[in-house]
Every structure is written in C-alpha cells, then in structure tokens.
C-alpha cells in the first residue's frame, strides 16, 4: 500500500512529530538535547523556516513550523533527522536507524487561529501530560517564551498568539489562562519490547570508528561534545528563556 501524500500548501504551518526507533528513550541525555537545539539552529540557517513551537521529550519531539516554501518541508526534516542521527549515533556509540519510520505531519492554514492555539497548547502540555512537570514550564519546550515573553534564539511567536491581545503582556496573560484551562490526560505509552532497551547512563567504551571520506564534520570537531562552545551557546540561550526550577528530574543539574 502506498503512503499518503503530504499536503503542502502556501501559508500552512505543520505540526511535526518524530519518534526514536522502537520508541526507545534515547533523548534523555543533556548532551543530546543540547546538540538537538544546535541542529535546529543550523537547519534554520540553511532553510529559513519559522519555528513556532518545540518540545523535546525523552523519546519523541514535537515541532510547529512553517517552511519558507511548502515543498521544502521534506528537505528540512530529512536534513534535520539525518544530521541528528549522525551526531547521536556517534555520541552514543551505536549504529543503525535512530529515528522511527516516517515523521508524522499535520498541516493547517496559519489563519486558523483556533487550531494554531490548540496545537501550541498541546505541544506545550506534553511534559505535564507525561507527568514530568506539574505545570507547563519545561527546559526543552518553548512555553517560557510565551509566558515570560523571552527570546530563546530559535523559536518565534505564532500570529495567532500575537492576536490574543493589544499588547504582548495581554497576549501572554491570555495564553497563560488558556493553558491553565487545559486538562491533559496521561496516556500509557505503548512500547515495542522486541529488542527495546533503556539508554545506558554512561556511554560504553568502544573502538574508535573511522569516519567516511564524505562524512560531514560534527559541531565539536574532534572535541568532546561537552566542550563545544557553539553548541552550548545555542542550548544555554534556549534553556535560559524557558527553564523550569527545580530542574527536570533525570535531566541533570542546571544553574540558570
């Protein structure tokens, strides 16, 4: 059976969901999340798309983005998934598929204010629905930029958010109340137990792998990822704009 064709139209934004292969929890490491934010920034510089919402969970990621040209969406996701898979496989000393099958996308017109706001809220509510957070603030989603009117260097406000009030403060207050009315129901995750394993807490030592001649260099250039200034700068700005205190359990200590 052939796969359904994507619906690419001008003036549309897209709710994208990507999952780790076998739904394994491979995005729990702080270093992986920092590199993920850096990869998004590089993809924006390459393709010029607008990112309205982002939430990085332990085994999947949500985006709400608007490509510069509708037909560029597959190129954006192909590059982003390829680049992050290359980085993560090297960081975690693994091989094979990192992301699960085809990414899911649902497009709608940017003028559909109700759907845009509901999609924003759904994405921002993911940590609360998963019982990771009591509220909406989360270090690795951009809810904080809407509540605090901060700038995380990667995302921007959707037109529907800017239409909530006459001033930015009024927009933030109305969106905050809109989110507080949401009552997400936790969904038990269905896992594929065939070969599924939790991500080890430490990277296993192994033989150094030879890089192929045409392989793109990673952002840290033979350094450890934790020593990459550029990666840290992008991640630090995002986290500072959206952080939740106390820090997210399992993510590691973070001074903000």
Image: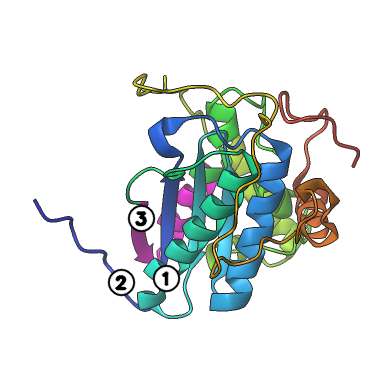
Q: Position of residue 210 (x, y in %)?
A: 60, 54
Q: Of all residues shown, which one is farthest toward the right?
A: 255
Q: Secondary structure at mark 1?
A: helix
Tell me where residue 8 sits by quadrant: bottom left
| Nearer to us in this view, 76 or 177 | 76
Q: Is residue 186 above or below residue 38?
A: above
Q: Position of residue 191 (x, y in %)?
A: 38, 22
Of labels 3 and 1, earlier in sequence is 1
Q: Is residue 206 above or below residue 188?
A: below
List the residue tagged with mark 1.
75
Q: Secondary structure at mark 2?
A: loop
Residue 48 showing in the rendered view: no
Tell me where residue 7 sits by quadrant: bottom left
List the residue tagged with mark 3.
105
List the residue tagged with mark 2.
8
Q: Which residues are magenta?
A: 103-121
Q: Position of residue 106 (x, y in %)?
A: 34, 56
Are dots 2 and 1 in contact, CB under 8 Å? no
Q: Residues within 10 Å of mark 1 (few under 14, many from 20)?
A: few
- Camera-nearest label, 3 or 1: 1
Tell me where residue 134 sits by quadrant: top right
Q: Position of residue 109 (x, y in %)?
A: 37, 68
| Nearer to us in this view, 87 or 8 | 87
What is the C-alpha distance between the residues marked 3 and 2? 10 Å
Are dots 3 and 2 in contact, CB under 8 Å? no
């Amino acid at each position: 059976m052939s796969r359904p064709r994507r619906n690419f139209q001008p003036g549309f934004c897209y709710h994208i969901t990507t999952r780790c292969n076998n739904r394994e929890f491979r995005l729990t490491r702080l270093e992986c999340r920092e590199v993920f934010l850096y990869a998004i920034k590089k993809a924006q510089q390459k393709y010029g798309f607008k990112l309205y919402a982002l939430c990085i969970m332990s085994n999947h990621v949500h985006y709400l983005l608007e490509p510069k040209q509708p037909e560029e969406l597959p190129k954006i996701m192909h590059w982003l998934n390829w680049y992050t898979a290359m980085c993560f496989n090297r960081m975690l000393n693994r091989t094979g598929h990192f992301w699960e099958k085809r990414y899911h996308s649902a497009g709608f017109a940017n003028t559909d204010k109700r759907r845009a706001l509901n999609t924003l809220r759904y994405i921002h509510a993911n940590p609360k629905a998963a019982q990771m957070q009591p509220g909406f603030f989360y270090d690795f989603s951009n809810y904080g930029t809407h509540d605090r009117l901060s700038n995380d260097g990667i995302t921007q406000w959707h037109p529907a958010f800017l239409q909530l009030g006459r001033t930015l403060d009024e927009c933030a207050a109305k969106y905050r109340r809109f989110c507080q009315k949401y009552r997400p129901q936790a969904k038990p995750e269905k896992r594929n137990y065939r070969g599924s394993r939790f991500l080890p807490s430490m990277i296993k030592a192994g033989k150094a792998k030879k890089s192929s001649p045409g392989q793109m260099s990673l952002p840290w250039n033979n350094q450890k990822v934790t020593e990459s200034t550029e990666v840290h700068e992008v991640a630090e700005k995002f986290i500072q704009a959206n952080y939740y205190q106390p820090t997210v359990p399992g993510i590691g200590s973070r001074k903000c």
